[in-house]
């Protein structure tokens, strides 16, 4: 493991460069006095040239890919090694701020600069990409740069036109690219092990918590709907209140319900009525029709669908009570993008070491990571921005926060790139690979099949196959795995990895509580007498009292029921241990 750590002086110099370069990039704009830089414009190409020059100064090989992304590679200890991809976007909305997107590219440069200045080459290479289009400002389609890298451009994108009638295909030609070669921008899955992106939060949570940095748990899924209440227009002075069919009153009733129901559903779900149109729209006419939009977002698709169903059901009830009708249509839908659990842990550890603690939060806005997650594990860290303002000239970050961001970012990348357990597993001898995963479970057939299926493109593929193999387990495998398993409440002996796993999993069991220890011992003995094997439970995160309660419940199971429950616990523990092996 590489021991170099970025010190305060190095971080200060890095943050100063980031702020200066953000100012320099902000001068490249099509609108004097404002920042506007759209895809495939002359300004886009100038920004690419500037960033490419900065890449070359820190030992990176550079190129523009076939969709206009600026790319750089800092080689690993072995030429052609798998790489960690870092990046964000260089395009902007109109009249933008100077940090949305650009901060992620510029801080990534400082990660590589630290390696270059210290003559460090890691087990993995580092690549940086400045995506050409994330915002969709010019053509109304988003993530053109990142979807070029994943090879997922829809065929019809080349025909999309901007406000001047110029197609994407023509814009590519005008910028010196060949539309017939866009597929050459795609990278193969084995080229990268992970993608990391640093971005301003675009929200007020970190500022409210007085923290510079946070870890993104997921990029919210979203649904946008066109909604309509239809009642009956009438004269404002002649129709009694009791018989009105006021579409606006129904909409207002629903809007207040949306606000209250969303607030109590979950703290990280949001719903917004963003536009409202009354027809006929006269001061002296009861609104007969109201058109409104609903935008609902959540980091979990299941919760989003559940809440949306609740809101639409309530709209129908309100309509029925008021004698009006309601209908809706989803016109935009994107699923939630969870960030990789292992990358979240690495980022959390780095951020906690830099600022004392870390906060996890979802992203309500979209990012290039949405596209990249189709092929590679993604991780994101947020940096605090003033009042949460984004997409506006008032967008602002503090240099002191950028210092912390560069330190945490560098620490994370070095931890990931210095050792790649998947590469070690794929490339090692059969015995080396078996020894790596043997502590997960004492079922040789499972470990042997997992090793025999090497190589794996990424950890997700390995975990999926490992999970499928556990479905074949039965009573024989359960008894074999538990033959030497420590009892709950009795710490595993030794310093081996399996013992360390067991100790960590039972860390919440208070062995100083003599009454609890005795009760667990008695329960274990009763369980072993009844079922002929030790009691197994996924103990991590459970208190000793919780475990004892579950032990007593399961003593009432039939042998068949208990075998099913114990097998499921064994599967969960095994897969969690496997995740832990490859997160190191």
Image (tube, rainbow, N blue to C red):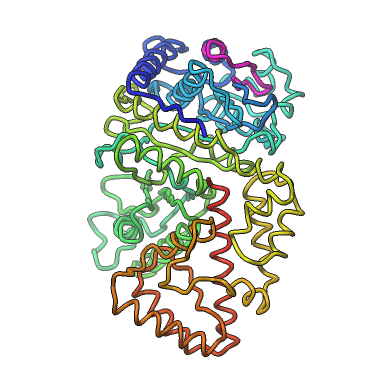
Residue 278: image x %, image y %? 36, 47
Residue 203: image x %, image y %? 33, 38
Q: Does residue 524 sit above or below 180 in this rendering?
A: below
Nearer to us in this view, 217 or 490: 490
Taking the view exactly as shown, the residue that stands out farthest to the front is 494
Q: Does residue 111 sit above or below 176 in this rendering?
A: below
Which residue: 62% across, 50% down? 460
Is 408 placed left or right of 476 in the picture? Answer: left
Residue 149: image x %, image y %? 65, 31
Nearer to us in this view, 80 or 482: 482
Is 157 placed left or right of 530 in the picture? Answer: right
Q: Number of labelled discs?
A: 0
Residue 253: image x %, image y %? 30, 59
Which residue: 40% across, 75% down? 547
Which residue: 64% across, 62% down? 467
Which residue: 26% across, 48% down? 284
Q: Please tell me whether residue 321 belongs to the stretch shown in magenta.
A: no
- State which region is magenta: 52-72
């Amino acid at each position: 493991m590489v021991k170099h750590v970025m010190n305060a002086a190095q971080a200060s110099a890095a943050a100063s460069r980031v702020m200066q370069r953000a100012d320099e990039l902000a001068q490249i704009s099509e609108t004097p006095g404002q920042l506007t830089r759209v895809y495939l414009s002359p300004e886009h190409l100038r920004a690419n040239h500037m960033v490419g020059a900065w890449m070359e100064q820190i030992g990176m090989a550079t190129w523009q890919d076939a969709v206009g992304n600026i790319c750089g590679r800092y080689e690993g200890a072995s030429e052609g090694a798998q790489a960690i991809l870092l990046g964000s976007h260089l395009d902007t909305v109109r009249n933008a701020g100077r940090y949305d997107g650009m901060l992620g590219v510029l801080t990534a440069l400082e990660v590589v600069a630290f390696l270059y200045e210290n003559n460090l080459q890691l087990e993995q290479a580092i690549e940086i990409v400045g995506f050409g289009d994330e915002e969709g400002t010019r053509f109304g389609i988003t993530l053109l740069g990142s979807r070029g890298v994943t090879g997922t451009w829809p065929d019809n994108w080349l025909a999309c036109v901007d406000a001047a009638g110029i197609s994407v295909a023509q814009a590519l030609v005008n910028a010196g690219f060949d539309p017939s070669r866009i597929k050459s921008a795609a990278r193969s899955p084995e080229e990268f092990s992970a993608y990391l992106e640093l971005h301003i939060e675009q929200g007020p949570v970190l500022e409210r918590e007085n923290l510079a940095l946070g870890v993104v748990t997921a990029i919210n899924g979203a649904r946008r709907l066109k909604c309509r209440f239809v009642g009956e227009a009438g004269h404002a002075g002649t129709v009694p209140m009791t018989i009105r069919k006021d579409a606006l009153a129904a909409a207002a009733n629903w809007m207040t319900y949306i606000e209250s129901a969303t607030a109590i559903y979950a703290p990280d779900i949001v719903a917004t009525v963003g536009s409202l149109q009354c027809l006929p729209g006269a001061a002296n006419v009861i609104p007969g029709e109201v058109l409104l939009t609903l935008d609902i977002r959540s980091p979990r698709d299941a919760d989003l669908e559940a809440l949306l169903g609740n809101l639409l059901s309530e709209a129908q009830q309100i309509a029925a009570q008021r004698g009006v009708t309601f209908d809706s249509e989803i016109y935009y839908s994107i699923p939630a993008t969870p960030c990789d659990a292992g990358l979240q842990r690495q980022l959390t550890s780095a951020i906690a070491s830099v600022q004392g603690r870390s906060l996890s939060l979802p992203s309500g806005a979209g990012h290039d990571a949405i596209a990249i997650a189709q092929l590679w594990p993604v991780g994101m860290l947020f940096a605090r921005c003033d009042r949460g303002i984004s997409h506006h000239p008032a967008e602002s970050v503090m240099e002191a926060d950028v210092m912390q961001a560069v330190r945490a970012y560098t620490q994370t990348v070095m931890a990931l790139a210095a050792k790649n357990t998947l590469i070690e597993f794929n490339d090692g001898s059969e015995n080396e690979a078996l020894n790596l995963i043997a502590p997960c479970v004492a079922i040789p057939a499972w470990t042997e099949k997992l090793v025999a299926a090497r190589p794996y493109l990424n950890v997700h593929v390995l975990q999926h196959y490992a999970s499928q193999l556990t479905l074949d387990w039965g009573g024989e495998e359960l008894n074999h795995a538990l033959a030497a398993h420590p009892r709950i409440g009795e710490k595993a002996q030794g310093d081996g990895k399996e013992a360390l796993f067991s100790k960590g999993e039972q860390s919440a069991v208070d062995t100083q509580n003599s009454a609890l220890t005795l009760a667990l011992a008695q329960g274990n003995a009763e369980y072993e007498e009844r079922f002929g094997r030790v009691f197994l439970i996924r103990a991590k995160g459970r208190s000793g009292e919780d475990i004892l309660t579950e032990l007593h419940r399961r003593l009432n199971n039939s042998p068949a029921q208990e075998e099913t429950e114990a097998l499921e616990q064994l599967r969960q523990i095994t897969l969690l241990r496997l995740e832990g092996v490859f997160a190191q």
